[in-house]
Each structure stands twice: as C-alpha cells, then as structure tokens.
Image (spheres, rainbow, N blue to C red):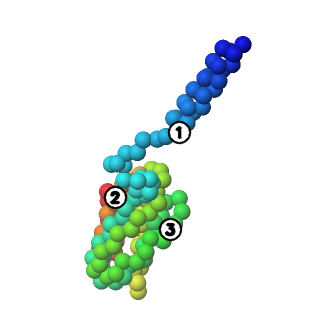
Amino acid sequence: MTRRVKYLAMAVVAMALAGCAGSVEPSNPFAGGAAAARSIRINVVNNNFNEATLRAVSRTERRLGIVPGNGRESFTLAWPTVDDLRIRIDVLAGDDILTNRISVGPGDTVYLTIANPLYRSLLRR
C-alpha cells in the first residue's frame, strides 16, 4: 500500500512541475516590445506654410496632433490589427482634406507629406 501512495505522490509532483514549466515564455531581444508590435509610426513633413492639425481616420477618427508650418513631427498610434488608414489634414486658416487610403498593420511606419497646395498631399508606406 505504501508503494502505491509513493507513486501517486510522485505523479502529483511531476504534474505540478510540468504545469509550472509551461507558463514561462522565452523573450525575444529583437522583438522591440509589446507596445511597438501593436502600434504604427506616422512621420509627417509639412511643406505648407500653415500649421496643420492631423486626425487618423479608420473605423473611428482619432486626433494625432499638430505639425507647425514648414515643420516635421512623428506620431505613434495604437494599431492592433491590419486596417485601412487615412489622415484628415486641417490647415489653420484654410481648408481640410482627407488623404488617400493605405493598408497598414502593427509595426509599420507610414509617411505623410503635406503639400502646398493641400490637395497634393500624399500618405505612403
């Protein structure tokens, strides 16, 4: 009877150790972190003389920020899945325009050039 108890105790300990060992996930030093993998970067060059307010348009519209006239900015936006992106450009003391549509996924970098005249602005990967 003690032999059965001994084997049963060893089996329980082995299952407990196997359960604990499965919960450890190895880290990848080249991954760049979880936040980078779930976001996109938007680099903006404003060749227009006026300040521009930018909004990302996908399924919803989210404010990115302001780019000064003849300035450059970079924005990071949470982006967990592949989806289409457009940027609404609202120029101070001027018109607003919606850029062309591009498909982007987590980890991508996109480039927006705000042109003068505004309708020549371009969003690209």
Label 2 SS? strand
Q: Establish if 7 lies above or below 85.
A: above
Q: Earlier in the sequence, mark 3 or mark 2?
A: 3
Badge number at residue 23: 1
Q: Establish if 35 lies above or below 2.
A: below
Q: Is residue 101 left or right of residue 45?
A: right
Q: Earlier in the sequence, mark 1 or mark 2?
A: 1
Q: Residue furthest right?
A: 1
21 and 101: which one is in front?
Answer: 21
Q: How far apart are marks 1 and 2 (CA)?
A: 33 Å
Looking at the image, is mark 1 or mark 3 nearer the viewer?
A: 1
Q: Position of residue 117 (x, y in %)?
A: 30, 76
Q: Position of residue 53 (x, y in %)?
A: 42, 77
Q: For the point 51% across and 66% down, which residue is it?
A: 61
Under mark 1, the amino acid is: Ser
Q: Quadrant of the N terminus?
A: top right
For label 1, the crowd category at 10 Å Cα-Cα, with few meaning under 14, some 14 to 19 and many 20 or more, is few
